Each structure stands twice: as structure tokens, then as C-alpha cells.
Image: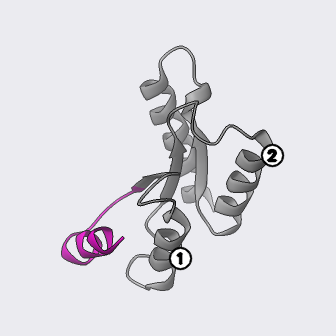
Amino acid sequence: MLRAEQFLREDTFDLIICTIVFDESKMFDLLRLVKSQTEWQQIPFVSVRARAHIFLSQRGLDGIAFTWRELGAEFFDIADYKVEPERELRDSIDAFLRTRQDT
């Protein structure tokens, strides 16, 4: 977590992508930090579950997705993407960024 904060302070970012197992499940701490700092609040923040064996409960995944959205971020479960996961994730992120621009 401290290293992520250091990176944020040392550079500028157009997008933050964080896995749901970031730094021993401190992904919400990172999101709260980003949203608490005026200079970072407008950076789009995306969380991703990349592996199907991580967090298997659908109810838990639904809760994570809901929480991310309530906190101003987005959640993508690319573990369920079957054809071209990387392309599908890029397409999903592009669509998310377009909706942010429209608001």
C-alpha cells in the first residue's frame, strides 16, 4: 500500500487498475486513499478479478462490484471472459471511461 501511494505521489496517472487481491486485500484502502486526495479523485479507478479461483462466492463478487461502484470506481470480473480476456477487459475499460466522460 505504501509503495502504491509513493507511486501516486511521484507521477501522474490516467487510470488506476487494481486487482481484488491487491496488497493482501487492501484494494478498498487504496481506493479510499485515492478518493480522499483532491489531486487523485478524478483518476478513473478499476478493480479486476483476473483468476477464477480467487473469491469464488457470487454473492461476495456482487458485493465487491456494488461497493466499488458506490465508492466511484468500477469492477470487472475478467476471470469470466472466455474469448480474449485482455481485449475484452480493454473494451470494458474503454466503455467505462466513455460513460465517465458523458457525465
SS at badge 2: helix
Q: How many angstroms separate mark 1 from mark 2 (CA)?
A: 22 Å
| Magenta region, residue range | 1-16
Residue at the spot x=20%, y=70% of the render? 11
SS of the residue under disc 1: helix
Query: Alpha-carbon neighbours of circle 2 within 10 Å: few (<14), some, or many (≥20)?
Result: few
Q: Residue at x 68, y 55 (%)?
A: 64
> Which image quadrant is residue 4 in?
bottom left
The x, y position of residue 35, in whole percent, is 51, 77
Magenta segment: does it hold 19?
no
Q: Is residue 46 left or right of residue 74?
A: left
Residue at 44% from the left image edge and 85% from the top image edge: 38
Q: Is residue 3 magenta?
A: yes
- Per the rendering, the mark at residue 59 is 2
Horizontal relation, residue 52 to residue 34: left or right = right
Mark sitting on residue 32: 1
In the picture, measured across the screen, residue 36 lies left or right of residue 69, that is left
